Image (spheres, helix red, strand yellow):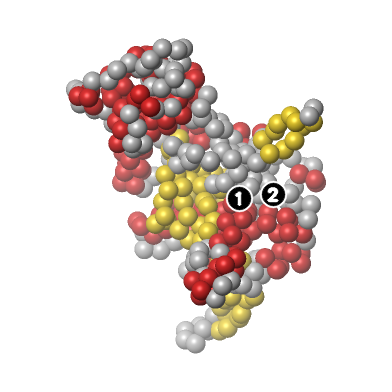
Amino acid sequence: MNDKTKAEGGRGAEVDPGFLTGREDRRTGLGVDALKRALLDKLVYVQARFPQVATRHDCFVALAQAVRDRLLQRWVQTARTYRDRGSRTVCYMSAEFLIGPQLGNNLINLGIYDNARQAMKEFGLDLELLLEEEEEPGLGNGGLGRLAACYLDSLATLEIPAIGYGIRYEFGIFTQAIRDGWQVELTDKWLRSGSPWLIHRPNIAFEIKLGGRTEHQYEALGNRRLRVQWVPDKLVRGTAWDMPVLGYGVNTPNRLRLWSAEAPESFDFAAFNAGNYDQAVDAQISSETITKVLYPNDETEAGQQLRLEQQYFFVSCSLQDMIRLQLQREKNLDYFDEKFVVQLNDTHPSIAVAELMRLLVDEYAMEWDQAWAITRRTFAYTNHTLLPEALEKWRLELFKRVLPRHF
């Protein structure tokens, strides 16, 4: 490893080119030899780097990717088992997940912290310095987010099938610095170098409606039920990003699934050809704003609308994802509540109750009474405070403008 990356000075160990082969599998092995080969494998075949020029950050990423391979092996086996058994799943919806840096935690949970330390030492690296390279994930801020993260850890340790649902914020709430003796708030660019733990699922995506109006019409045949159609002003596409969450001393990772927002059509080619270059990307910029920042300032009208759109966005994506999973095994949603139980972490995801009703009644033509019975059996709620300033409240005019079908 080069001089910038060395833990205590001195050149890194020279590497035998044949070292990438060995007896213990470099993707799944837990021994020192396997971890050393895994680090080299990630440097060479993923980052296109060789040890003599690799930076400390390169080595951190390589080690994290090697650890992730071991998590994914267990994750795939666990997911297959849960699917085959039809296990009931806890879905924890939260606007925050204060999970903290993951590398050290995953090494401990896998029981390979000491092996990793020795493997890095044999390469002339200090594991503690590599751990310091990891950015704090900008997914949470306070006690609410820490509670959510602890729940996910505990559910995995207890081997209870669970999915955490939240938002993949591009930026955290902020980072602090001192300039000329004053504290200033700066952008928390936690994803500036990407995250070795996040797995993009572009094929798992849902369209989210915002604004517009509703139209009422009666069915042409049968009992002529009244149907309500939501005609939105705007569509936003939510795509999934997954992060494995391993429990302590077990082989059953659960999943943290986060949603990022994008436009269904990210580039207006006609506008670009007409010379309207800013307009060509307006839709993408507007859509991506929804998942830009954790807790946007809601002192303005625009900020309040963004907060409401943000909360509805991740709730709708998550419920549509659960429905997708249910319909992989069942022909209908009659037993949805027997497959999923949803825990709402405070008021941020509380619109989920109305949204599940909308999906069942409008999108899947379920009778109101049956849909309401399923919805009541599906949800549970954690209340964090009774202080009015801490509860989510929306002006009726704003709520009607953003979510006309739920009004």
In the picture, the quarter occupied by the C terminus is: bottom right
Residue 373: % across, % down: 55, 59
The answer to whether residue 54 is above or below residue 121 is: below
17 left or right of 138? left
Residue placed under numbered mark 2 in the picture: 296
Residue nearer the viewer, 27 or 130: 130
- Name the residue: 67% across, 35% down: 175
Report crowding for label 2: few under 14, some 14 to 19, many 20 or more residues within 10 A (C-alpha).
Answer: some
Q: Which corner quadrant of the image does residue 216 belong to? A: bottom right
Asked where in the image residue 243 lies, by quadrant, the reply is top left
Q: Which mark is residue 292?
A: 1
Residue 59 appears in view? yes
**Circle 1 sits in a helix, a strand or a loop, which is it?**
loop
Residue displayed at 46% across by 47% down: 241
Which residue is at a point 45% across and 58% down the rendered structure image?
205
CA distance for labels 1 and 2: 9 Å
Q: Which amino acid does label 2 sit on?
A: Pro
Picture coordinates of residue 232 (x, y %)? 60, 72
Question: The disc labelled 1 sits on which kind of residue?
Answer: Lys
- Rendered location of residue 404, percent (x, y): 66, 70
Query: Please, is residue 378 above or below residue 109 in the view?
Result: below
Q: In this view, does 10 lie above or below 103?
A: above
Circle 1: is it few (<14), some (14-19), or many (20+) Cα within 10 Å? many
The percent position of residue 345, horizontal first and vertical second, equals 62, 43
Q: Would you say residue 236 is visible in this rendering?
A: no
In the image, taking residue 39 as reference, residue 101 lies left or right, namely right
**Above or below for 321 versus 65:** below
Along the viewing direction, whichever of 63 and 125 lies nearer the viewer: 125
| Residue at 63% over, 47% down | 293
Q: Are marks 1 and 2 in contact (CB under 8 Å)?
A: yes
Numbered mark located on residue 379 in the image? none
